[in-house]
Image (cartoon, grey):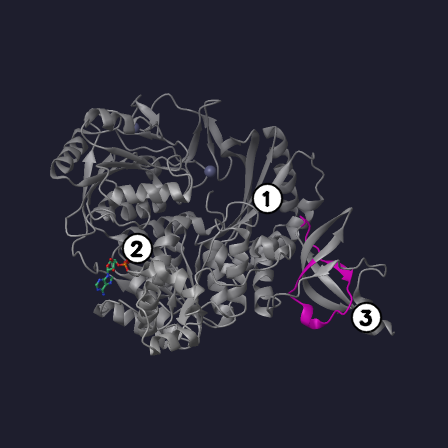
Amino acid sequence: MSPTEQLVARVAIAVPIPQLFDYACENLSRSDIGRCVRVPFGRGEKNGLIVEVVPAGQAGHDALKPVLHVQRDVPPLPADWLALVSFVARYYHEPLGEVVALALPPGLRRSDAVESAAADPFVTVTEAGRAVLGQPSRASRARALTEALAAAGAQRRSVVRAWPGGAALADAMRRGWIAAGAADRPPHESAGAPAPTEDQQAAVERVAEGFGRFACWLLQGVTGSGKTEVYLRLAERALAQGRQVLMLVPEIALTPQLEARVASRFPFANVVSLHSALSDGARSRGFVQALDGAADIVLGTRLAVFTPLPRLGLIVLDEEHDASYKQQEGVRYSARDVAVWRAQERGVPIVLGSATPSLESWQHARQGRYRHLRLDARAVSAALPRVRVVDTRHVRLDEGISPALREALAARIERGEQALVFLNRRGYAPVLTCTACGWVSGCPHCSARLVVHLADRRMRCHHCGTEGPIPPHCPSCGNVDIHPFGRGTQRVEARLAELFPSARVLRLDRDAARTRPQWETLLARIANGEADILVGTQMMAKGHDFPKLTLVGVIGADASLHAADFRAPERLFQQLMQVGGRAGRAHLPGEVLIQTEFPEHPLYRHLARHDFDGFAARELDERRMACFPPFSHQVMLRADAPELEQALAFLAAAREAALARSGEGVRVFDAVPMRMTRLARRERAQLLVEADRRGELQAFVAAWLQDVRGLRAPRTVRWQIDVDPLDV
Ligand code: ADP
Ligand code: ZN
Ligand code: ZN
């Protein structure tokens, strides 16, 4: 055997170093690229993926260990999928093996047997069933059901079960009259589609004209404007061309609704749902159905962006501004950005939808890099909610509740309508403000805000590292009543119950709804009118329809008005517009009450006019002046350790290495403690690196990380790199 014919498998394994590993493998051929393998590693075994097959001569050394098992029961991952994970590894500076481990369902990686039968198969009438129907015979429930199915054609099992008389399905299947089979109608055949509005029709036509080529569309439409209708019509067009559709939503909580809507619209399509709450078996099955082309529509959360789709024709990403698309641990990828890259690579259109686009996407649309589509009116209920700003500077708040809000709540209870009290209590950094003159603790050396650290009574800039003592009075007007934002609003719920003893108060937050069933139970109770006042945090802001909800009261919004994070106002505006969109969805007019000490703030004024564009333009002007994204690009190096000093020392060393390398266009800031310094008994710090051009930053980081990996740090120090960080 000549050594040149010998081939070697180059395997990506989930280890924290950016390296591939070579293994010997019997009967190896280039068609094994993209297959999962089990390999010996160190003193144990690991799962991996063959990403290259190379001649033995190119292998690192000769005594290669053999692959233990090759998963040949499922098709190999295709070349475009390998290109996708390679891109993510490169862009986010993570080892390819880690990205592969993230992107593949665990069951597939372990080479578990993949159960390929559909979860909800189509059922059809068999030959035997038809024969029975052709003869006069005793009436039975099974016969009646078989007759109904014969008339309707193949249906999903769950659909038939739900028919009157559907209970006889098991009997009819046992008799062999009905059996699992294929849909006998095309997947794009749709049911129950409303006639599109003119705007919807125009949007669909424009996107559909470009099928078969890459284009990124920003579909900006107020809540209830019918964006989902546009997605469904586009999906119909893509399905009709024999293509697959990928639909992404930010939250698992939103998938059942969309799933139900998609499945009832396309009764004959194979719809696969993919998210992290599925069992390993279900995830593998959905993934393989997508991979072998059997799935027509794949819908899921950010993880689903890695689904292999050989017939991909369209990507839709709803609520594109949502921070949930960015993974906050491990490989810190943005599913939105990865989806756009993927659409471009595959030459298909992508639609990013939102009522309140991210300023990055909105800016792209304004510059013409993305194409802009708008739906400016609600599809059914005509009016947007009225937004009223309640000045709380001169009123007494009762556990955060103003007299105006109290009155508005009483009126809703009187009328038998629902109200939502929305607490903005994200962990925003406390910034010092003066309510007398509007002064805010800005950094003297850069455009960020100084953050109050009550522990040592200091103020720090988390951008450049400047620090100083907390001033005893307002440096601008002398007012001594200056205070940091972010005081607790936790007692609001209890107080509401006291104020309105006859009302049923329901709390909706991460504690009350830890699991999906809990969350669905709560939603069902609201829909059934079992609650009068809802008290919720940001998870309430997202895409739910409550027809009887007519009032949204917002408490604690100011905390993010002057927060240190430059994205805080953007998030606040998005959140308030989304949460306001919950009010008055059906035929009752809605109202939004915002309690604030800054009633004149432009953010609230734009909000009252539902003027997202005005807000976005103004906010982007500020970012341009300050050189914040999207006018610069950022990478954050974070470190954590039992002692803050260790984390800071590590970052200081990394900073030295960065300064030794950084060219003209790269700005390296000081290492600073993170806003929430302590987490899980570890102290955290961060180091920001910025550049005007993305390419320059990427090249710099790739080289710099080699230095960082070589730094001698205590073993207790852990670090991570975050490209395009959302929290700065
Ligand atoms: P969005 O996704 O923008 O919030 P949806 O697509 O969910 O909006 O539409 C909001 C509501 O309006 C839904 O109840 C939907 O069924 C209804 N709707 C949307 N488009 C139409 C239409 N063309 N005709 C009638 N009802 C529509
Ligand atoms: Zn002042
Ligand atoms: Zn600063």
Circle 1 SS class: strand
Which residue is denoted by mark 1 in the rendering?
A: 720
Q: Is 200 on the left-hand or right-hand side of 41?
A: left
Where are the magenta residues, as a range? Answer: 15-37
Which residue is denoted by mark 3 in the rendering?
A: 6
Q: Earlier in the sequence, mark 1 or mark 2?
A: 2
Instruction: Give the quarter of the image for residue 176.
Output: bottom left
Q: Earlier in the sequence, mark 2 or mark 3?
A: 3
From the viewer's side, name the closer residue of 573 and 17: 17
Q: Give the Cα separation between the discs numbered 1 and 2.
A: 33 Å
| Disc 3 residue lies near ligand 1 with CB under 8 A | no
**Label 2, residues with CA under 10 Å away: few <14, some 14-19, many ≥20:** many
Residue 725, given in percent of the width and then of the height, sits at 49, 47
Is 452 situated above or below 262?
above
- Is there CB contact under 8 Å for labels 1 and 3? no
Q: Nearer the viewer, mark 1 or mark 3?
A: 3
